[in-house]
Image (spheres, grey):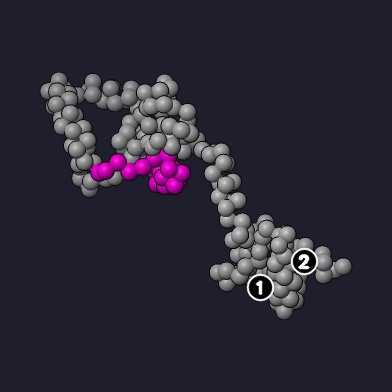
Amino acid sequence: MRREHKLGQLEALLFAAGEPLGVPQLAELLGMTKPQTWELLGLLQEEYKTERRGLELREVAEGWQLCTKACHHEAILQLANTQELKLTNASMETLAIIAYRQPVTRAEMEAIRGVKVDGVVNTLLEWELIAEAGRKETIGRPILYKTTNKFLEVFGLKTLKDLPAMPDILAEDEARHAKQLSLLGEEEVDELESEAPEEKSAVTQE
């Protein structure tokens, strides 16, 4: 009875950890010796070898971890493809900036949000909601980003023209930008406006 209880504890620990656990750590958590822990791992591994179990106990990265069996890979992919994307506020803000200002660089996103966007951009790339759109013809030639067809599909849009009203974070940025321009002299404003079409053309050609 005690061994069955410890076997259940071991399974619970491996499930809750979500990452490989080494024998020394497992032994300490279970209040057992290392040889006893090795024996328990062997028993649990054997139990998972039956066809009725969808998991297997695998030794990886100097530890032990519960993993899905390779034979169920297709079912796991089906789940991943049907799960709803859950975007954080940070992801939604960054995605909105890209959607309304594309093509746009990371530095331009950060200037609007006031924080780093590396992690969020990488996540949006992984989910295929955005993609690279060439490089901007400026110092360092930073990567430009744009939204994808999957972005339109996920948000039920036919084209980018169907985007809703501009979110507050972009409206506030436009207001700040307009105020900054109003503080410049007329000659400086004319110079900025004359340079804008050239810059846009350079990006489009890229």
The part of the chain drawn in magenta is 116-135
Q: Between 131 and 183, which is closer to the camera in this rendering? A: 131
Are circles 1 and 2 on residues that touch, CB within 8 Å? no
| 191 vs 129: above or below | above
Please give the residue where the numbered disc 2 appears in the rendered image.
7
Question: Which residue appears farthest toward the bottom when viewing the image?
Answer: 35
Callout 1: few (<14), some (14-19), or many (20+) C-alpha neighbours within 10 Å? Answer: some
Residue type, label 1: Pro
Please give the residue where the numbered disc 1 appears in the rendered image.
24
Position of residue 38 measured from the top left corner of the image (x, y, whole percent) = 70, 75
Of the numbered discs in the image, which one, if any, rests on residue 79? Answer: none
Quarter of the image with the C terminus in it: top left
Q: In the drawing, does residue 33 fall left or right of residue 172? A: right
Position of residue 173 measured from the top left corner of the image (x, y, whole percent) = 35, 27
Residue type, label 2: Leu
Q: Residue at x 26, y 43 (%)?
A: 134
Quarter of the image with the N terminus in it: bottom right
Position of residue 40 measured from the top left corner of the image (x, y, whole percent) = 74, 72
Q: Between 165 and 28, which is closer to the camera in this rendering? A: 165
Q: Earlier in the sequence, mark 1 or mark 2?
A: 2
